[in-house]
Every structure is written in C-alpha cells, then in structure tokens.
Image (cartoon, rainbow, N blue to C red):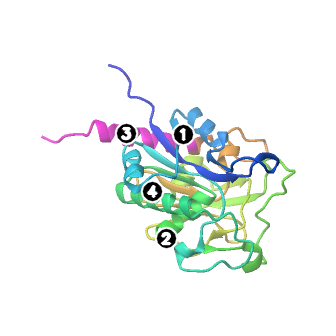
C-alpha cells in the first residue's frame, strides 16, 4: 500500500505592481511568495503551492477545497476599513484590498471548517481581523512605551530582536517545548482586541500579543514574528522548525481524515 501523498499547503500570494524599467514599457504585476516560506514547508514534508489572489470567489473556493492547509504570510498593512476604522496616519501603508479580501475569506473558511492554518506577521494580524478583532495601527504612535518591533534593513532577517513569553498549556508551548523564545521582529502594527474564539498564546515583554491560537481547532495558530527565517536558527534565536513540522503534520491528518474518514458500524 502506497503512503499518502504529502499534504498540499496553499500560500496566499502577494501582488505587487512593478514599475516599467527605465520609465518605458507596460506596468506589470508580480504574483508570488518569498522562497523562505516555501522552503520551510517543503523541509517539513509539505507540497507548497502559491495561491493567486485575482480569482473569483468561486475559483478561490474551488482551490481552497483541494488544500490540506493554509499559510498566510507577511506583507503590507491590513486596510483598517475591514475593522471599521480609518488609517491613523501615513504609517499605514502597502494596503492591498484584493489581498485583504482573499485572505479574510480564506481565514474564515479555515476557522469554520477546521482546516489547519498558520499565520505569520501580517497573517497573524489579518486572521485576527477576519474573526472580528482589530489592530494597533502603529505601535510607536499608539504605544510609545513599547519595545522597538522593527529591525533596521541592514541587519539579517534572523536578527534576534526580543524575547517572547509563551503561555503555559497552549498549543504553541507544546510545539516548541518551552515557555520563552528569542525571535526576530519586523512589524509596526499589532493585535489589539482579539477575534472570536482566539486566545493569546504569547506576549513580548511590553504586552504586545505575539501569538494567537484557536484552542479547539486541529491547528489554527498565528505568530507575529517571522519563523520562516528561523528554520535553521542561529545560536541567539529559537529554532522554529518544530512549528512548521507541527503544522504540516496537522495538514497531513486533515488530508487523511478527509480522504479516508473513519466509519462507524
């Protein structure tokens, strides 16, 4: 008997408008995802697939139904209109309503149907918004006493930024087998009020929510840091390979239950 195929994980793409080279030619749109996300998923045993955003809701749903898990990646800010507010100031940037709409729709489907989901940075924030929560739009402006959560561009992506305390008894604590980690950090927004059914699984020393999870779910977990840069961590940061492995294992379990459900009687 052949082993089941590797679980198929959908990584929702980023869409960026590229300026014509040298001011000539047609503008183009880049659709894709950073290799670091795909690499960590592949190392954990998944088959990652990049999901384009410019699909009709029917087409997006058709693709969603073929996936065994969803990864919502980092990126620009979520449009405040999705949580009933207006942009605070010009720090709110790189808004992409197309991406917001697709990711919010997919996050809600995953939550309702117990499809494994891993959210990273923006993915952490957009998942909270999808389930009815809201965001701190700019940490330095609204929480001036907070730690610095951005990292200078000349430092490596795995640069250790600050510690994160993990709440005991959470799925995240069980996965990482610790109550404290050292993470990287590249964000200026943060979770404020939690979405329905979500609990805070980790905090930075200044009280910023660094992880969320849905306790009763098969796997529904989001983190504010960038674990895709920590799969092979330095001695100063915490190895995040177990996080991707646990996610992929949950996706494999979902695949198995969907295709080979246990029948009673």
Mark pair 2, 4: CA separation: 15 Å
Dot 4: element: helix
Q: Quadrant of the N terminus?
A: top left
**Which residue, given by chain and number where applicable, does mark 1 sit on?**
245
- Point 58% across, 80% down: residue: 85
Percent coordinates x, y for residue 8 in the rendering: 45, 38
Quarter of the rendering containing residue 258: top left
Cβ atoms at labels 2 and 3 below 8 Å apart: no
Percent coordinates x, y for residue 179 in the rendering: 63, 56
The relative height of residue 225 versus residue 8 in the rendered view (above or below) is below
2 or 1: mark nearer the eye: 2
Mark pair 4, 1: CA separation: 22 Å
**Which residue, given by chain and number where applicable, does mark 4 sit on?**
106
- Point 74% across, 74% down: residue: 90
Instruction: State which region is magenta.
Output: 244-265
3 or 1: mark nearer the eye: 3
**Which residue, given by chain and number where applicable, does mark 3 sit on?**
255
Dot 1: element: helix
2 or 4: mark nearer the eye: 4
């Amino acid at each position: 008997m052949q082993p089941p195929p590797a679980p198929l994980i959908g990584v929702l793409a980023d869409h960026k408008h590229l300026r014509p080279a040298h001011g000539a030619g047609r503008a183009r749109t880049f659709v894709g995802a950073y290799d670091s996300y795909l690499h960590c998923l592949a190392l954990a045993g998944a088959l990652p697939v990049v999901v384009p955003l410019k699909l009709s809701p029917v087409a997006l749903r058709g693709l969603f139904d073929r996936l065994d898990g969803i990864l919502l990646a980092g990126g620009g800010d979520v449009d405040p209109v999705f949580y009933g507010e207006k942009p605070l100031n010009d720090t709110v940037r790189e808004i992409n309503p197309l991406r917001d709409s697709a990711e919010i729709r997919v996050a809600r489907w995953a939550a309702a149907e117990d499809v494994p989901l891993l959210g990273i940075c923006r993915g952490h924030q957009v998942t909270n918004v999808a389930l009815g929560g809201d965001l701190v739009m700019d940490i330095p402006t609204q929480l001036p006493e907070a730690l610095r959560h951005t990292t200078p561009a000349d430092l490596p992506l795995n640069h250790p930024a600050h510690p994160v305390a993990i709440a005991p008894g959470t799925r995240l604590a069980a996965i990482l087998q610790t109550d404290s980690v050292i993470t990287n950090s590249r964000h200026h927004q943060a979770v404020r009020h939690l979405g329905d059914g979500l609990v805070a699984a980790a905090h930075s020393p200044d009280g910023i929510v660094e992880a969320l999870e849905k306790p009763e779910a098969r796997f529904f977990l989001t983190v504010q840091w960038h674990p895709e840069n920590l799969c092979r961590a330095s001695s100063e940061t915490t190895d995040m390979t177990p996080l991707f492995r646990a996610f992929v294992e949950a996706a494999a379990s979902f695949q198995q239950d969907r295709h080979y459900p246990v029948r009673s009687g």
